[in-house]
Amino acid sequence: MSESSSEPTDHELFVTEFPKGNFGIVDYLQGRVHFALMDQMKLMHKSGMNQEQIKEAIIKTVTEIVENFEPKKESESA
């Protein structure tokens, strides 16, 4: 069953692809994070959240991610 509608999907409306060429890995990763945050904020705004609610939600999520980050130690045999 395929959709014949020309309406864009939610993914097409809210997911911006970061260009892959001519960027170092750090710039590429930072760009992807930036685009992902902007896309999330655009969706949150469209769903009715105000700027302060969006800010609080994003900061809470990023804080949890950073606080729960536990880098894996490289094994001695590697």
Image (spheres, rainbow, N blue to C red):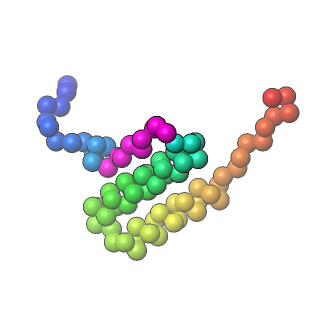
Relative placement, left or right, of 78 versus 21 is right
Q: Please identify the residue farthest to the top as the structure is shown.
A: 1
The residue at the point 19 percent across, 27 percent down is: 2
Q: Quadrant of the N terminus?
A: top left
> Which stretch appears magenta?
14-22
50 relative to 68, above or below: below
x and y percent of residue 56 in the render? 47, 70
> Which one is nearer the viewer's eye here, 78 or 21?
21
Instruction: Return the residue found at the far front.
Output: 22
Q: Residue at x 14, y 31 (%)?
A: 4
Which quadrant: the C terminus?
A: top right
Q: Residue shown at 52%/42% (left/top)?
A: 23
Q: Residue at x 14, y 37 (%)?
A: 6
Residue that protrudes farthest toward the right in the picture: 76
Left or right: where does residue 6 sit relative to residue 67?
A: left
User: Residue 31 versus residue 44: which sits nearer the camera?
Assistant: 31
Residue 58 vertical placement versus 73 (above, below): below
Q: Is residue 7 left or right of residue 43?
A: left
Horizontal side of residue 62 vs 39, given as left or right: right
Q: Position of residue 25 (x, y in %)?
A: 58, 42
Q: Nearer the viewer, residue 62 or 36?
A: 36
Magenta stretch containing residue 23, yes or no?
A: no
Q: Residue furthest left?
A: 5
Can you give x and y, in whole percent of width and height, for residue 12 in the image?
28, 43
41 shown above or below 78 = below
Instruction: Tell me how many marks there are.
Output: 0
Residue 70, percent across and down? Answer: 70, 50
Majority SS type along the magenta span: loop
